[in-house]
Amino acid sequence: MNYYSSDWTATEHLRAAHAIAQRPEIAPVDPEKMIAARKAGASAWELHERSIAGEFAPATTYEWRGSF
């Protein structure tokens, strides 16, 4: 079963997953920062690239394992 619409989409997903695996601190995003960028005119693709670059990282990290 193919979950992706094209080879390019699958490759991009793997590239993003690899980037996050190499730098797990960039995985979380601050939704307020991302929403502000979208309202300022950033495309979905730009948001994707900027989030991988760590631009939307929250000011403090959230430790999800400690909340249960």
Image (cartoon, rainbow, N blue to C red):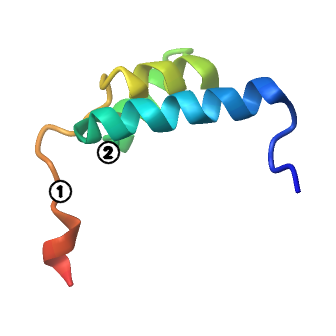
> If the image is split into quadrants, where does the N terminus sit?
bottom right
Q: Residue at x 35, y 20 (%)?
A: 53
8 left or right, relative to 59: right
Q: Which residue is drawn at 51% across and 31% down?
A: 16
**What x and y, as percent, mark residue 42?**
55, 16
Are circles 2 and 1 on residues that touch, CB within 8 Å? yes
Q: Is 34 displayed left or right of 65 in the figure?
A: right
Classed neighbour count for the residue bearing mark 2: other residues with Cα under 10 Å, few (<14), some (14–19), many (≥20): some
Counting labels gives 2
Could you give the CA–CA distance between mark 2 and mark 1, rounded to whole angstroms? 8 Å
Tell me the crowding category of disc 1: few under 14, some 14 to 19, or many 20 or more residues within 10 angstroms, Cα based: few
Instruction: Please tell me whether residue 23 is drawn above or below residue 27 in the rendered image.
Output: above
Which numbered disc, 2 or 1, marks the residue that appears first in the sequence?
2
What is the three-letter code of the residue carrying label 1? Tyr
Q: Which of 36 and 51 is in front in this view?
A: 51
Q: Look at the numbered disc 1 and give the secondary structure of its residue.
A: loop
Which secondary structure lies at badge 2?
A: loop
State the residue at coordinates (81%, 50%): 3
5 relative to 14 in the view: left or right:
right
**Nearer-the-camera pick, 8 or 35:** 8
Q: Mark 2 points at which residue?
A: 28
**Which residue sits furthest bottom?**
68
Amino acid type of the residue that numbered disc 2 sits on in the rendered structure = Pro
The x, y position of residue 35, in whole percent, is: 45, 34
Q: Residue at x 22, y 67 (%)?
A: 64
Residue 62 badge: 1
- Say whether residue 46 is left or right of residue 22: right
Q: Is residue 36 above or below residue 32?
A: above
Measured as percent of width and height from the top left, residue 27 is found at: 34, 42
Judge by depth and name the residue closer to the eye, 7 or 62: 7
The quarter of the image holding the C terminus is: bottom left
